[in-house]
Amino acid sequence: MVKNQCLAPWTARVLTLFPEMFPGPLAYSLAGKGLKDGIWALETVDIRDFARDKHRTVDDAPFGGGPGMVLRPDVVSAAIDSLAEKTGGQCDGPVIYLSPRGSLLTQDRVKALAAEKEVVLLCGRFEGVDERVLVEHKVEEISLGDYVLSGGEPAAIALIDACVRLQPGILGSAETLEEESFERGLLEYPHYTRPKVWQDRAAPEVLLSGNHKEIRDWRLKQAEAATKERRDDLWQAYLRKTRLDKRD
């Protein structure tokens, strides 16, 4: 049963050589329940369906030589065009290519993507995609980090999950989102639960005090300390923002 029948759900449309990899882990837990309830939607398109020969060839050797194969621009472009045709000539959201040379995915970018009607995710394989199709379709390149995966599908699943959990109705409490890492430009503070003492390690007394102001202050200091120690880039950005806020 679709709960949000008046509004179209946020939609992820995935171009891939392996549609059977989806929904994968997205079929479970909160994302899976949201998918079943119609809070978000998933569509996969098999790039091989747009091959131009009986062998369903989607790649070819790179010009200039070198190892590996490259996804053909005519095949990939036809796959992208097939999505645009369904929505009256253009896609209703950005077309994103998951690539290690792309801009690093941040929580701010996730928020922006989660606010779109849909996102189109192009999953590369082999040595990548012919550059001309990326230029032709004004494709945005996004990376999850400075490492290489065997294909874009795992990265697409991670990006979708990050966007889905921001959709209204997925998480039970808005406070859950507000307290997470990156929401204030800081890493999240450490968490503790029962038992009070475990392996001779006691939970911080301030968390048991019932004094909400002291707890908030402690958590902020812990978040600042963790960020300063582990992510100097975030820490410096946080300091700049704090100075600007104080100046304003």
Image (cartoon, helix red, strand yellow):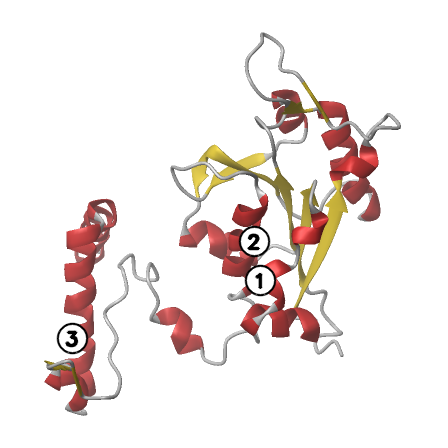
Residue behind mark 1? 25
Q: Position of residue 219 (x, y in %)?
A: 20, 73
| In the image: residue 55, left or right of residue 132 | right
Q: Which residue is mark 3?
A: 217
- In what element is the residue under mark 2? helix
Cβ–Cβ under 8 Å for marks 2 and 3: no
The answer to whether the residues at label 1 and label 3 have Cβ atoms under 8 Å apart is no
Image location of residue 70, percent across then percent down:
64, 23
> Is 52 placed left or right of 144 in the picture?
right
The residue where tag 2 is placed is 157
Residue nearer the viewer, 102 or 237:
102
Q: Residue at x 24, y 44 (%)?
A: 233
Q: Earlier in the sequence, mark 2 or mark 3?
A: 2
Q: In the image, is residue 14 above or below residue 246?
A: above
Q: Are marks 1 and 2 in contact (CB under 8 Å)?
A: yes
Displayed quadrant of residue 2: bottom right
- Residue at the extreme bottom of the image, as rendered: 210
User: Which residue type does callout 3 highlight?
Assistant: Asp
State whether residue 92 appears in this view: no
Q: Secondary structure at mark 3?
A: helix
- Distance between the alpha carbons at the discs numbered 2 and 3: 36 Å
Q: Measured along the vertical axis of the image, is residue 24 above or below residue 6?
A: above
Amino acid tagged 1: Pro
Residue 120 point in image, percent of width and height? 65, 46
Q: Quadrant of the N terminus?
A: bottom right
Image quadrant where residue 103 sits:
top left
Mark closer to the chain start, 1 or 3: 1
Circle nearer the viewer, 1 or 2: 1
User: Between tags 1 and 3, which lies in front?
Assistant: 1
Crowding near pointer 1: few (<14 within 10 Å), some, many (20+)?
some
Q: Check disc 2: other Cα within 10 Å, few if <14, some if 14-19, many if 20+.
A: some
